Image: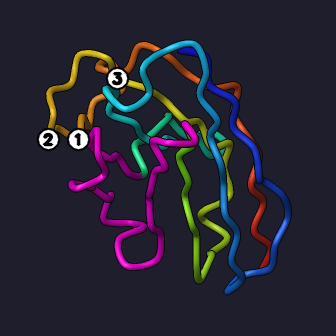
């Protein structure tokens, strides 16, 4: 599956933004999906993951309560709605797909994801 992330930009702290990840070339509805991010000088980390149907989600502690991951399997798109953004959210955000995950799984290890988008930059200013 090919993934295309979009929606990044520059916002002020406290603002909101929504990222999108468009998928093509595979059976989107049978892939677990996730958003990862890599901040300046940091390792890539999981932000949120979502199961095949979206019935199960997982969030890292740093974004719990502020971000919401969702997907539309009819349109082959995944979203990340980000609220109350903080400067520490500044990073390149990547979407990823896991073809090996079972129905309700929300994989948390980046090694479980086979396909990656190109990344979209988010900059949050204070």
The mark total stands at 3
**Residue indicated by mark 1:** 106
Identify the magenta region.
Answer: 48-76
For image coordinates 62% across by 46% down, the residue present is 39
Q: Which mark is residue 58?
A: none
* Image location of residue 62, percent across then percent down: 39, 66
User: Could you tell me which quadrant the C terminus lies in?
Assistant: bottom right
Residues 109 and 49: in front is: 49
* Image location of residue 117, percent across then percent down: 63, 26
Q: Nearer the viewer, mark 1 or mark 2?
A: 2
Residues 18 and 84: in front is: 18
User: CA gap, disc 2 to disc 3?
Assistant: 12 Å
* Image location of residue 10, percent across then percent down: 85, 64
Return the disc, 2 or 3, that comes first in the chain's sequence: 3
- Say left or right for 60 vs 17: left
* Image location of residue 17, percent across then percent down: 70, 69
User: CA gap, disc 1 to disc 2?
Assistant: 7 Å
Residue 119 belongs to the span the image colors magenta: no
> Is the Cβ of the residue at disc 1 closer than 8 Å to that at disc 2?
yes
Helix, strand or loop for disc 2: loop
**Residue indicated by mark 3:** 98
> Is the Cβ of the residue at disc 2 closer than 8 Å to that at disc 3?
no
> Is the Cβ of the residue at disc 3 closer than 8 Å to that at disc 1?
no
Q: Which mark is residue 104?
A: 2
């Amino acid at each position: 599956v090919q993934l295309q992330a979009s929606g990044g930009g520059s916002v002020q702290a406290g603002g909101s933004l929504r990222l999108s990840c468009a998928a093509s070339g595979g059976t989107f509805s049978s892939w677990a999906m996730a958003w990862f991010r890599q901040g300046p000088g940091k390792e890539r980390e999981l932000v949120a993951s979502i199961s095949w149907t979206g019935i199960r989600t997982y969030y890292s502690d740093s974004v719990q309560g502020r971000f919401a991951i969702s997907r539309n399997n009819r349109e082959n798109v995944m979203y990340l709605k980000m609220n109350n953004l903080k400067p520490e959210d500044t990073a390149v955000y990547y979407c990823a797909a896991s073809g090996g995950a079972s129905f309700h799984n929300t994989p948390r290890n980046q090694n479980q994801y086979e396909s990656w988008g190109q990344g979209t930059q988010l900059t949050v200013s204070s």
